[in-house]
């Protein structure tokens, strides 16, 4: 019975993978591992005149050492910012009170994404709102520059 189940699961994965390779669709899923800029307006590459909005993507990791990595994020006023909050260990969330930004509280191995516009210049503390994690040092700074 276990062999049949394993074959069925592997077949389903291969079918889904094959179908996703054949489609030419831009995924809405975030790319983890680096800060990137992407064109979310659906314009043809190189045709920046039709670009409606640029999104700056950051992966912010949290873990049970009660730190965020990176602990500082810099953006320009007016930028659309997407934060992929990656929980490496424990139970955490990501909050910026001054910009009304909040992820769900997620457990180890999960990712939650928030997108917002950095519409005010200044320094904004981000932190984990679970228990006393903020007091233990699980915080950082979002710097919005002109």
Image (cartoon, grey):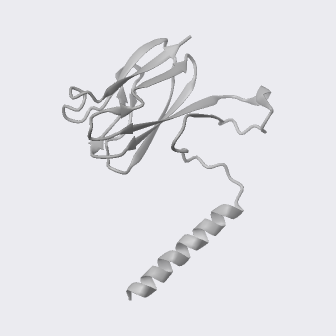
The quadrant of the image that shows the C terminus is: top right
Left or right of 118 on screen, residue 88: left
Q: Residue at x 42, y 30 (%)?
A: 70
Q: Is 82 left, or right, of 37 in this rendering?
A: left
| Quadrant in the rendering for residue 37 | top right
Q: Is residue 87 above or below residue 13?
A: above
Eyeballing the image, is 143 above or below 64? above
Residue drawn at the location 70% of the way across and 60% of the way down: 23
Of residues 142 and 52, which is closer to you in this image? 142
Return the residue found at the far left: 132
Instruction: Give how far across and how far down residue 115 sits, in percent.
Output: 50, 33
Residue occupying the point 27% across, 34% down: 66
Percent across and percent down for residue 62 are: 35, 38
Number of numbered labels in the structure image: 0
| Residue at 46% over, 17% down | 143
Residue 42: x %, y % from top left: 71, 39
Q: Residue furthest bottom?
A: 1
Left or right for 41, reference 12: right
User: Is the residue 134 above or below the residue 5 in the image?
Assistant: above
Q: Which image quarter holds the N terminus?
A: bottom left
Percent x, y of residue 39: 67, 35
Q: Quadrant of residue 106?
A: top left
Residue 98, image quadrant: top left
């Amino acid at each position: 019975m276990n062999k049949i189940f394993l074959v069925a699961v592997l077949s389903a994965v291969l079918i889904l993978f094959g179908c996703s390779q054949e489609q030419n669709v831009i995924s809405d899923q975030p790319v983890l591992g680096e800060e990137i800029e992407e064109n979310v307006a659906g314009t043809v590459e190189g045709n920046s005149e039709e670009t409606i909005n640029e999104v700056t993507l950051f992966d912010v990791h949290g873990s049970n050492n009660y730190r965020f990595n990176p602990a500082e994020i810099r953006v320009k006023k007016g930028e659309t910012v997407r934060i992929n909050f990656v929980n490496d260990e424990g139970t955490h969330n990501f909050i910026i009170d001054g910009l009304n930004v909040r992820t769900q509280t997620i457990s180890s191995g999960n990712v939650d994404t928030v997108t917002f516009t950095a519409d005010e210049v200044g320094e904004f503390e981000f932190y984990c709102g679970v228990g006393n994690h903020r007091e233990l040092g699980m915080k950082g700074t979002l710097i919005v520059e002109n």
